[in-house]
Image (cartoon, grey):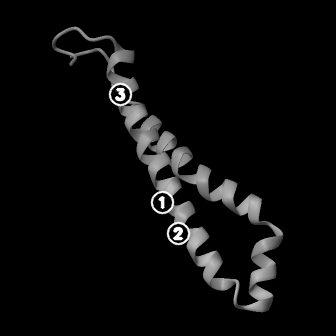
Amino acid sequence: MKLVGAKLSTIKIPVILNGLTAGLLSGVLSLSIFTFFQEQIQSLGALATIINIHRLVHLIIIFLTGPVLALIVSVFTLRKVSIKI
């Protein structure tokens, strides 16, 4: 893309969007796995109460971990990308 004269933002934005999309998909997948296991743990008494106390916090952390990690990785990957050929 550099050789055809693309701007720096034109090179970086698709990589960041790809990482965020993968992060959101991984967040949804991990959220569904967490929900499945939480339903399975409901049969256990003490462990179920510990998980249910902070359920919303757990769900938010699990859902946001994927996109945040993807954004960090994208930023580190794109640090050295420049317009210079």
Which residue matches tag 2? 33
Amino acid at dot 3: Pro
Q: Give coordinates of residue 46: x percent, y percent.
A: 80, 89
Mark closer to the chain start, 3 or 2: 3
Amino acid at dot 1: Leu
Which residue matches tag 1? 29
- The residue located at (34%, 17%) in the rendering is 10
Instruction: Please identify the residue farthest to the left as the structure is shown.
Output: 3
Q: How far, Cα to Cα, is label 1 from label 3?
A: 22 Å
State whether residue 22 is above or below residue 74.
below
State whether residue 13 is above or below residue 35.
above
Q: Nearer the viewer, mark 3 or mark 2?
A: 2
Instruction: Please identify the residue farthest to the top as the structure is shown.
Output: 5
Q: Are marks 1 and 3 in contact (CB under 8 Å)?
A: no
Badge 2 local density, few (<14 within 10 Å), some, or many (20+)? few
Q: Nearer the viewer, mark 1 or mark 3?
A: 1
Q: How far, Cα to Cα, is label 3 from label 2?
A: 28 Å
Q: Give coordinates of residue 79: x percent, y percent.
A: 41, 31
- Mark 3 lies on a secondary structure that is helix
- The residue located at (60%, 69%) in the rendering is 35
Badge 3 local density, few (<14 within 10 Å), some, or many (20+)? few
Residue 14 is marked as 3
Which quarter shows the C terminus?
A: top left
Q: Are marks 3 and 2 in contact (CB under 8 Å)?
A: no
For this rendering, which residue is in front, 85 or 4?
Answer: 4
Q: Are marks 2 and 1 in contact (CB under 8 Å)?
A: yes
Mark closer to the chain start, 1 or 3: 3
